Amino acid sequence: MPFLGQDWRSPGQNWVKTEEGWKKTSADDKNNNLSALSFCKAQKEECFNKENLLIALNYDVSAKKRKKDLMNNNTKVPYFHMEKWIYVHKGSTKERHGYCTLGEAFNRLDFCSAIKDTRRFNYIVRLLELIAKSQLPSLSGVAQKNYMNILERVVQKVLDDQQNVRPIKELLQTLYLSLCCLVQGTGKSVLVGNINIWVHRMENILQWQQQLDNIQINRPSSSGMTLTDLPDSLQLRIMDSLSDGRDLVCLGQVCPELGELTEDRLLWKKLCHYHFTDRQIRKRLILSDKGNLEWKKMYFKLSRCYPRREQYCDTLHLCTHCHILFWKDTNHPCTANNPEGCTVSLSPQDFINLFNF
């Protein structure tokens, strides 16, 4: 390599790179032009070879990237559907951007399949009811779509099984009244999305209500033993397992014999002590003309004043160590030494509070 500066070896002369190495040429050299041309030609060929090499490398990199993306898609799609848990985070960090949304939780926790489980059905219905009361304006477009899809499957399950008709009727009525109040605020950004979409959804709700009203429960044709054939003690034992007073009232309307049993004071007393505290009961005492406590009237009066106790067979759980939300019978990748000690059961209201930012 020549010295860049005042060259003491050959002042005023040029150095040309050839295949054999660097050679010194004078300004009067006849072969100077030929050497310069050969040098330029060599440089062009070298550049051309480098460009071809870069194109080939870019092609290989892009091909490998497409292959890697295809492999990731093929592996991640079933992974998200198989794992029924979600990491709940409320803010952005250096490691993770964004936050978990309610619509994403609907999708990842697979609520559409969870409603098929009898243990989770009442939990999801209560969750949908709470969202219909207070969370509709905060739902995104994806969350709205997931919510209505889950509701449609719930209604279809009730129509097929002919069970849990009353809770679903109350859910649809609550949702329809909430939408009527929110639709009146058109132009105030109350609901996300086009108003025509919500009007169409309201029409679907009315149609579902009509289908539920037209349900006719057929009695089984087999002439087997019925509830009234059992002794009174067994009938009272079965009624004692009901946790909702409205179910007792509906059962008493079936026949006069059951109506007499559902008026048992001990049944309503147990219901009052199950759902409400002693202090709440003392504030709402109702006495009859004979001085006895009217437990049935007290139950419905307490229900209007205080929330009833909620109990579910299966609920969502939150791991306080890794902040993962999951179903009770599903596993999650916990790194704690004692995963069971870090697990907290969530009520429907606690689940909604996780997404109130």
Image (cartoon, rainbow, N blue to C red):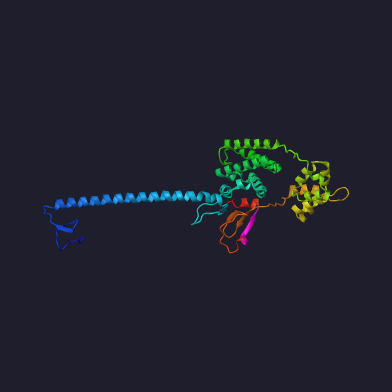
* Residue 102, horizontal then vertical, whole percent: 58, 48
Query: Horizontally, is 24 left or right of 105 in the view?
Result: left
Q: Is residue 90 within the magenta segment? A: no
Residue 132 visible somewhere in the drawing: yes
Instruction: State the residue in front, 260 or 348.
Output: 260
In this picture, residue 277 sits left or right of residue 85? right
Q: Residue at x 62, y 59 (%)?
A: 343
Residue 283 spot, x, y in % from top left: 78, 53
Would residue 130 appear left or right of 263 to someone viewing this image? left
The image position of residue 99, as x and y in percent, is 54, 52
Number of marks? 0
Q: Is residue 184 visible?
A: no
Relative depth, front residue between 89 and 91: 89
Relative depth, front residue between 286 and 317? 317
For the magenta stretch, what is the residue range?
340-346
Q: Quadrant of the N terminus?
A: bottom left
The x, y position of residue 347, in whole percent, is: 65, 52
343 is within the stretch colored magenta: yes
The structure residue drawn at horizontal position 16% and vertical position 58%, both measured from the top left corner, is 23
Is residue 268 toward the left or the right of residue 1 in the image? right
